[in-house]
Structure formats: structure tokens, C-alpha cells
Image (cartoon, rainbow, N blue to C red):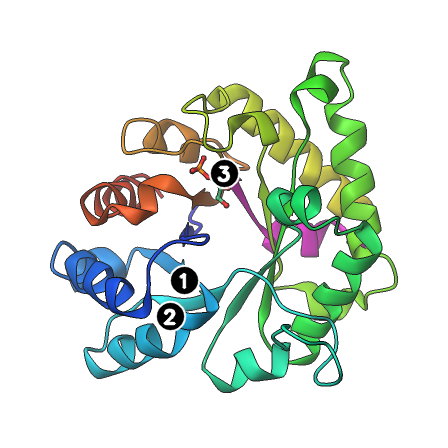
């Protein structure tokens, strides 16, 4: 394999900027630098905590990448309440989650919106982390592969393939998010293998091999090693457990020793 795994923590709508600083420092004391050389780590605090987290990362030289959870698809304009990708880039954000199922469900984001966001992230020289995943009903109907394929095709439509070598795609089955019921490692691998084969059709096999595929949904320190030992699972996107520095550090350690 020889790949470097990526462990990402999506803090969702949790932590004030002060709580975020405390959480980051608590994580930092639990990780050593040689461990962090073996695995890439990103954290995705809410917008209001990005600046504080960025300052601590830089001041303490913590080797984690700064990530955001969402952005608008325009760089500026009359969009009250929105945050643009150029604002994120200026703050030192390196990765932006696009198309999380919570945004698709609660904020009615379509594949077309997600495609525009993905292109906006790339235009601003950041890495998009595209989330895809099926509902429980779709899984039970045997429609998982079709759903993943249509979400991938929808998000990547019209995007220049040459810009996509750093793309990250996170497979997050909706039924596994926040439920304590992670996908079986074999199912996570099958879904990621399918994503890689669709990416290969869309972008060519060389590029498809470079794209990191993460699994997300009830990841914890006990299931990480088995999930990332699969060939097509290149890391994990962690929600709830990333809020607990003890658990998140344990997940990073598992990934570092498996990758
Ligand atoms: P949980 O790890 O809390 O299931 O959340 C997963 C997720 O949605 C990460 O983006």
C-alpha cells in the first residue's frame, strides 16, 4: 500500500473559539511529532473558531491541517450570512468539506450546488473533501452503488480533471452517522472500491489511484484499525469522537500504526 492515511475531525456545530483552543491543546499533548509524521490529520472547527485554531496551530507548530465544513460558491457578493472560499483561504484553511449529508438534508444542497462549491474551493487553491453516502432505505433497496455514482458524477460534472489530484472523497453512509453503528469494514471497502472505479471511469485510473477515499460514520478508537486496513479506505472522517481529544488521539494512533 505505502499510502499516507488522512484522519479528519469534523467538529460540526460544536465548540466556541475558546473551547476549540482548549480541545486542540488537549489533542496536541496526546500526540507526538513522530506519530504525526506517519499520518495526515485535519481538523474542521466551526467558522467562528477557525482563526483561533489557526493561531494556535501556527504558534505551537502543530502538524495538523486546518479545515472548514462548508463554504459558499462565490468569492464575494450579496449573500447575507454566508462565508466565501476566498475568506477561508486567507485564513489558512487547506481543506473544505463539501456536500456533507447534513448540508444536503437540512439545507437542501443539491449536486449542482455541491459541484459549484467544489469548483470554488479548487479555484481558491484549497482541497475539497466531497462527502457522499446512501440512506438506510437506499441501502436496503440495493441502491447504494447507484447513489454513490450519481453523487460523484453530479459533483464532478464540468470540473477540470487536472485540478482533482488532491481531491478527497469521504464515503459517509447516512445511517452510520451519529448512530454508533459504523459500516462493517467489508461494506466500507466495497463502497470505496466502487467509488474508485467510478473515479477511474471519470478521471482515468492514474488519478483515481491518487484520490484519497475516507470512511466516515461512527468511527471510534475500536473500529479505526480494521476500517483503514482495507486497500481502498485511505483514512477516516470522524464526527463525535473527534470532539474528545482522548478518543481522537487514539484514532490517529491507530491510523498511524496501520497505514
Ligand atoms: P459521527 O462520527 O459522529 O458518526 O459523524 C460522522 C460525520 O458525519 C463526519 O463528517
Residue 175 visible within the image: yes
Highlighted range, magenta? 202-216
Q: Which residue is mark 3?
A: 216
Disc 3 Cβ-to-ligand 1 distance below 8 Å: yes
Residue 202 visible within the image: no
**CA gap, disc 3 to disc 1?**
17 Å
> Looking at the image, is 250 positioned above or below residue 3?
above
Q: Residue 16, located in which quarter of the rendered image?
A: bottom left
In this rendering, position of residue 42 left or right of residue 31: right
> Looking at the image, is 188 positioned above or below residue 74?
above
Q: Nearer the viewer, residue 103 or 147?
A: 103
Name, please, the residue furthest toward the top. 140
Q: Nearer the viewer, residue 102 or 131?
A: 102
Q: Which residue is mark 1?
A: 45
Q: Which residue is mark 2?
A: 49
Q: Residue drawn at (45%, 21%), measured in percent from left and top? A: 181
* Crowd rating for badge 1 (residues with CA inside 10 Å; few <14, some 14–19, many 20+): many
- Residues under numbered marks 2 and 1 in contact, where contact means CB atoms less than 8 Å apart: yes
**CA gap, disc 2 to disc 1?**
6 Å
Q: What label does residue 185 carry, if any? A: none
Which secondary structure, mark 1? Answer: loop
Amino acid at each position: 500500500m505505502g499510502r499516507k492515511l488522512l484522519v479528519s475531525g469534523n467538529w460540526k456545530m460544536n465548540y466556541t473559539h475558546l473551547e476549540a483552543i482548549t480541545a486542540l491543546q488537549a489533542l496536541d499533548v496526546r500526540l507526538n511529532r513522530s506519530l504525526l509524521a506517519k499520518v495526515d490529520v485535519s481538523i474542521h472547527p466551526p467558522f467562528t473558531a477557525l482563526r483561533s485554531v489557526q493561531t494556535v496551530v501556527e504558534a505551537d507548530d502543530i502538524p495538523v491541517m486546518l479545515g472548514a465544513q462548508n463554504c459558499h460558491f462565490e468569492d464575494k457578493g450579496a449573500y447575507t450570512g454566508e462565508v466565501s472560499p476566498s475568506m477561508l483561504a486567507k485564513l489558512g484553511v487547506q481543506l473544505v468539506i463539501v456536500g456533507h449529508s447534513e448540508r444536503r438534508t437540512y439545507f437542501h444542497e443539491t449536486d449542482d450546488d455541491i459541484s459549484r462549491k467544489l469548483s470554488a474551493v479548487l479555484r481558491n487553491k484549497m482541497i475539497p473533501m466531497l462527502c457522499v453516502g446512501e440512506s438506510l432505505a437506499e441501502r436496503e433497496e440495493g441502491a447504494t452503488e447507484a447513489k454513490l455514482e450519481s453523487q460523484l458524477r453530479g459533483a464532478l460534472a464540468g470540473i477540470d480533471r487536472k485540478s482533482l489530484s488532491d481531491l478527497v472523497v469521504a464515503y459517509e453512509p447516512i445511517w452510520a452517522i451519529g448512530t454508533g453503528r459504523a459500516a462493517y469494514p467489508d461494506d466500507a471497502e466495497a463502497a470505496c472500491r466502487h467509488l474508485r472505479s467510478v473515479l477511474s471511469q471519470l478521471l482515468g485510473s492514474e488519478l483515481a489511484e491518487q484520490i484519497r477515499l475516507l470512511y466516515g460514520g461512527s468511527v471510534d478508537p475500536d473500529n479505526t484499525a480494521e476500517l483503514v486496513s482495507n486497500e481502498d479506505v485511505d483514512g477516516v472522517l470522524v464526527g463525535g469522537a473527534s470532539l474528545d481529544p482522548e478518543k481522537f488521539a487514539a484514532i490517529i494512533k491507530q491510523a498511524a500504526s496501520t497505514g
